[in-house]
Amino acid sequence: MVLLLALPRRDNEPMAHALIRRFGGFADAIAAPSAELEAVQGLGGAGAAALKAVEAAAPRLTRVAAGERPVLNNWRRLVDYLTAALARERAEQVLFLDARNLLLADGAQGRGTVNRMPVYPREVVRRALAVGATAPILVHNHPSDEPTPSKADVEVAAEVKAAAVFGIALRDHLIVGRGRHVSLRREGVL
């Protein structure tokens, strides 16, 4: 549909199949660098721009929808929201929830590099107190798309969990990978 709007009056189905073959799927195609998209025969700048617009819009729409209703009140909704919001981010995201699982705020707490994600538990607690949250959820992805928790992931979760003295109970620490996720709570680490 996106290609039809960007490149009207032609059969875009072969191009759509070529994009999926080259990049591995729709999400990977829209996340590909513009230069690589433009190199796909027939796509050009207009088609690449349309795909990049979809990439930019998807997490924003998900965040807006999350702000309108308590989407984090069941596991599937939480994972869907996080997958959309963090698809290719290198950031530690914190979701600040109240006792009824309503999302009060969310946002990046720090930007990561290829193999390191700086998280400062003090800042998580400070922000939770500022927005009145009682149940933060830490979330990030691993650039390798392998969601196995690292030693640092476990240590950060333990430090934030210690904030229970302030009435802030760490709900979970999730690591999102390509099509998979790991919950430190479900793994028995928290």
Image (cartoon, helix red, strand yellow):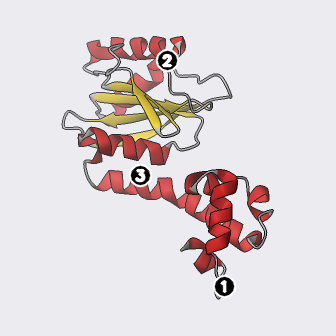
Distance between the alpha carbons at the discs numbered 3 and 2: 24 Å
Q: What residue type is labelled 3?
A: Arg
Q: What residue type is labelled 2?
A: Asp
Q: What residue type is labelled 1?
A: Arg
Residue name at image x 77 percent, y 64 percent: 40
Image disc number at residue 63: 3
153, above or below 23, in the image: above
The x and y percentages for residue 171 are 30, 25
Q: Can residue 22 be seen in this view?
A: yes
Q: In which quarter of the image is the C terminus?
A: top left
Q: Can residue 126 be seen in this view?
A: no
46, above or below 169, in the image: below
Closer to viewer: mark 3 or mark 2? 2
Q: Name the residue under label 2.
A: 153
Q: Earlier in the sequence, mark 2 or mark 1?
A: 1
Image disc number at residue 10: 1
Q: Earlier in the sequence, mark 3 or mark 2?
A: 3
- The answer to which of 134 and 114 lies nearer the viewer is 114
Residue name at image x 57 percent, y 57 percent: 26
The reply to whether the C-beta atoms of the residues labelled 3 and 2 are less than 8 Å apart is: no
Dot 1 falls on a residue whose secondary structure is loop
Distance between the alpha carbons at the discs numbered 2 and 1: 49 Å
Q: Earlier in the sequence, mark 3 or mark 1?
A: 1
- The answer to which of 161 and 142 lies nearer the viewer is 142
Residue name at image x 44 percent, y 59 percent: 61
The x and y percentages for residue 71 are 28, 48
**Label 3 Cα neighbours within 10 Å, binned few <14 / some 14-19 / many ≥20:** some
For residue 159, what is the image quadrant? top left
**Label 2 Cα neighbours within 10 Å, binned few <14 / some 14-19 / many ≥20:** some
